[in-house]
Amino acid sequence: MTPHWEDEAEEDGAGTMVRPYTITRGRTAPERDDFSLITVLTTAQDPRDEHGAPVRPGRLQPEHRMILDRCRRPAAVAEVASDLGLPVSVTKILLADLVAQGLLLARAPLSVARVAGGRDMGLLAAVRDGLRRL
């Protein structure tokens, strides 16, 4: 049986107010501010430091590990935040931690499109048609 005070915390949302603050260890902004909602993230396959030595991750929180697992396939910042169930601002702080450690790669979406061979006209047409139906 759940204690009465825990039920009240869940009902008024107070239980979720402390957690993001503790996840970021009190930080309210990422060290780098160049992530947009559509920045594409990918887990580094064989992370190495500037001397070529394998990178050994520092202490990782469960959320950091979930991000690395999620980003084995490219994902946008907004997708990662949604999957974690965390605010985008908190997610960006965690992402910046992983990028700083060399465990996560961040790329502007345009460079990903170029690597993939440019625009996918079929996708653009499907988006256009979907918007028209609205």
Image (cartoon, rainbow, N blue to C red):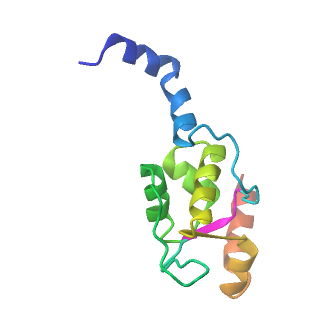
Image-quadrant location for residue 51: bottom right
Which residue lies at the image location 60% right of the left edge and 49% below the top edge?
Answer: 91
Query: With 108 as the anchor, is 40 left or right in this view?
Result: left
Name above or below for residue 4 compared with residue 35. above
Residue 55 x/y as whole percent: 49, 73
Question: Which residue shows up at 53% across the image and 29% down it?
Answer: 18
Residue that extends furthest to the front in the rendered view of this protein: 51
Looking at the image, residue 124 sits to the left or right of residue 102; the answer is right
Where does the N terminus fall, quadrant-wise?
Answer: top left
The answer to whether residue 90 of the structure is visible from this angle is yes
Give the camera-side residue of 102 and 109.
Answer: 102
Please tell me whether residue 93 belongs to the stretch shown in magenta. no
Q: Residue reaching furthest bottom?
A: 117
Q: Is 17 on the left or on the right of 30, as rendered?
A: left
Residue placed furthest toward the top: 4
- Is the residue 42 above or below the residue 27 in the image? below
| Residue 97 image offset from top left, x and y in percent | 59, 57
* As drawn, 115 above or below 71: below
Relative image position of residue 75 (x, y in whole percent): 57, 65
Whether residue 120 is visible here, answered yes or no, is no
In the visual, does 62 lie left or right of 96?
left
Label count reads 0
Task: Name which residue lies at 67% across and 74% down.
Answer: 123
Residue 70 vs 124, above or below: the answer is above
First to last magenta residue range: 37-42
